[in-house]
Image (tube, coloured by chain):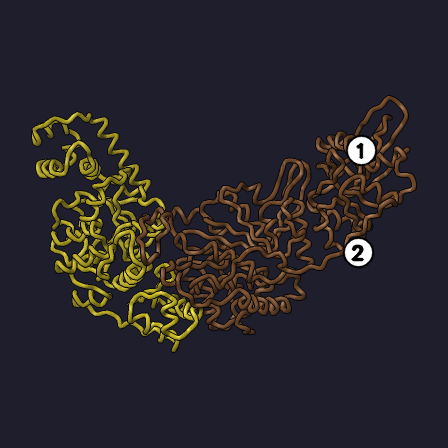
Chain colours: A yellow, B brown
Amino acid sequence: MLTEEERAYLWLCTAEEFDYREKVTLLRAAQPAEIFLHAEERAEEILHRPIVTPLSMREERADALVKALEQADAFVVTLFSDDYPESLKHITAPPLILFGSGNRELLTKRKFCIVGSRVIPPWAEKTGKRIAKELASQFVLVTGLAEGGDLAVIDGALPSGNLISVLPCGIDCCYPAAHITVKQKIREKGLLLTELAPGDTTRKYTFHARNRILAGLSEGVLVLAAGKRSGTLITASAALDYGRDVFAFPHNVGTAAGEGCNDLIKKGAALVTCSQDIFGWYGMQCAEREELPLTEEEGRVLAILREEGEMHLTAIAERAGMKPFEASAVLSALEIKGAAVKSGGNKYSILS
Amino acid sequence: MIAKIVCYALNGLEGVPVEVETDVNKGVPSYDMVGLPDAAVKESKERVRSALKNSGLLFPMNRITINFAPADIRKEGASFDLAVAVSLLKASEQLVGADIGDIVFLGELALNGDLRPINGLLPILISAKGHGFTRFIIPGANAREARFLGGAEIYPADTLLDVVKHLVGMEPIPPLEMAEFVPNAGRSTSADLKYVKGQPMARRALEIAVAGGHNLLMSGPPGTGKTMLARCLPTIMPDLSFDEALEITKIHSVAGVLGEEGIVSERPFRTPHHTATTVSMCGGGNKIVHPGEISLAHGGVLFLDELPEYKRSTLEALRQPLEDGKITVSRAGGTFTFPARFMMCASMNPCPCGNYGSSERTCSCTPSEIRRYRKKISGPLLDRIDLQVEVDDIHYDELTSSEEQEDSATVKARVDAARRIQRARFAEYGISTNAEMGEREIAQFCTLTKEGDGILRSAFERMHLSARARSRIIKVARTIADLDGSEDIQPRHVFEAVSYRIFDKIG
């Protein structure tokens, strides 16, 4: 149950009557409950402009918010809460209020962000998933809820529960709508977070604003794949603005889906191929990776695949001196063991 | 005088004997038909009248009553014309001394007395033979179809007058000589696997699919030869046996799509367009029920090009026949069961623009577009497709290369060998291919080694497979082992089988 003060704060932070700067000015000058009850006078006095919403409507709005939060089983973290993430306070325009649903304790742990565009090469998706899984032993992973890169991180980190997914919409909405079950699972094991009031839907700018929270929450940001104009680059540039570490996967020269990553590396982002790179950066120990038990044939095919990174099945078969269907059986074994991945059109890519 | 002549009505794929009774009496001239004839049968009045006159025979100016017995079956079509005409002749005493006895008369009359062919002749002949009739007079144009029925005297006639002359012994018609059945005698297509360039994976999938009777889905960019590959399927399928050919011919005969040859000697290859309705696929009709595309594909291949473009409801209707091998169509006029044991081969683009996974061109589809496109095919239907294979983008060099590819005959030999193993294995189980195995047969014939089971377990966990997909993988692995001539299912067989499930994403 929220106190009067919290209820007023909730109303103020989500009020459409004021913009962000006005809200900050109001909060500096008066208590939220005071502003809530006497908004007309305080606005006149502090902001030197009138507002027209009567008290009854403000009450109504506050009640609706409280009810929506209860329905969504969500909690509220204010800028003054003890567990408001410290790192988020240091960014420009920190969210005045955060709505969360799930494991609240994750807020205070060390956080690391991994993002990737929605269209992402299969190798980057698999490798990203593995890195997310490995990093989740030391960090809480921060990402969005979209397909492609975000989903890879969710798949990797969710089993450990160390996952925060920041939404570009209200806590009771789901974007993309197809990920409703994913969202439900994150709520059960990890944490959903947003600065938007319940009922708010996505707008163009909400993605932009959400990306600043992704960067703000985390110590570093790893970009799995980003095109030249990808939205993930907004997260990376926000991270730079806030002085966070930026990491990126290297991509083949000329691949449209990876141009943004290569640009980041050119500009000084750290090149990452495995989780050890990130653990090393932060001076952490990490568990040695177990050698995959491979048969002689699998080892041979893997060695061939390693030379070129991505190869067509026929080419692999020819080099290995096998029939194509024999090679396909071996590759399918490698795929199940997590050493290779099918990248469409009967081509296979190596996974590190 | 009363005359009784036997002819046959068609009920689904079965012939039902109908007696045409004609009574010619003194009285005011009239011409009535009773016994539930439909419009086309009633119209035979006029055809018979003209045919008699134009053949130089006499149409009795008496009180004529024609009865079709049994009266409770609805009689349709024009196949009763000849029987009506003959019974009229007999009742008006124009066939004195003719040996009509138990001859079955089938055929439609033209106004000038010519006999026209009828649909569904073969099923009628087979049923009638089963009922003990051995002598038939049929339209000459149907002779090709009839000559494959042994153990019966069949007289093909071209005109009504020929029939009369035959009956009264003036010019007996020589009985039809039985023809020998030659599989693939009328093969018309030039499709052969040797003309397919590259595509090792797709070729292999085709071979496995045919060897085990599995369903197949090919996914690939436009213009890569998916249709051409599919057209090669009948060329590597085992030859039809005579009984199979007769069964297929029955269906084609009823549907009226039987070719010149008179018998279906090659496995059917049906390609209904994606605008096909559910009824055209499954069979149906207003009063008389016609077999649909899936029944016409019985014993052969149903090729669905551009699978996601088909109407969802049409595809879902295929699910049950895919399992049961038959379709039961219920209409007001009755319930009919048609056989529909076909191999389904489908093709689709990997995404709406067709370039997903292509090395040359970039795909311009968003993930949600691709998801929507693939979602058009329901999970349950996908589960029933054992083999899913990607077809490669062809490069110009490959197209122009003169390298000889394996031809259909070589592949067919391997398929035949695998089929022999399966027939021997299932001799006592009433099935003939691996794809038809139920849980009981799987448990008995598809024991996995401990290693193989481990593979399947990890594949199962990583690919989020349904229980049905698991047994499908095992069945495919069994077929691969059969092609390999291996008694046990080895791990490599399981791995290969897993690689043919591209739509179950490995997580």
Residue A79 percent location from the top left of the image: 16, 45
Q: Which mark is residue B52?
A: 1
Q: Which residue is mark 2?
A: B151
Which chain letter matches label 1?
Answer: B
Q: Residue placed at 43% from the left, 64% from the top?
A: B459
Mark 2 or 1, which is nearer the eye?
1
Residue B489 percent location from the top left of the image: 52, 71
Q: Are marks 2 and 1 on the same chain?
A: yes
Please indicate whether residue B474 sits to the left or right of residue B261 in the image.
Answer: left
Please indicate whether residue B132 sits to the left or right of residue A208 in the image.
Answer: right
Would you say residue A217 is visible in this rendering? yes
Which chain letter matches label 2?
Answer: B
Q: Judging from the image, what secondary structure is the residue with disc 2 in? A: loop
Q: Please, is residue A281 above or below residue B168 in the view?
A: below
Pick the front one: B64 or B286: B64
- Residue type pointed to by label 2: Gly
Q: Please, is residue B353 above or below residue B67 in the view?
A: below
Q: Judging from the image, what secondary structure is the residue with disc 1 in? A: helix
Q: Residue placed at 74% from the left, 37% from the top?
A: B109
Query: Which quadrant, please, contains the C terminus of chain B?
Result: bottom left
Kindly report the distance in space between the C-alpha atoms of the residues bearing marks 2 and 1.
32 Å
Would you say residue A158 is visible in this rendering? no
- Residue type pointed to by label 1: Leu
Local packing at callout 2 (Cα closer than 10 Å; few below 14, some 14-19, many 20+) is: few
Pick the front one: B253 or B157: B157
Quadrant in the rendering for residue A163: bottom left
Q: Residue furthest top?
A: B28
Query: Which quadrant, please, contains the N terminus of chain B?
Result: top right
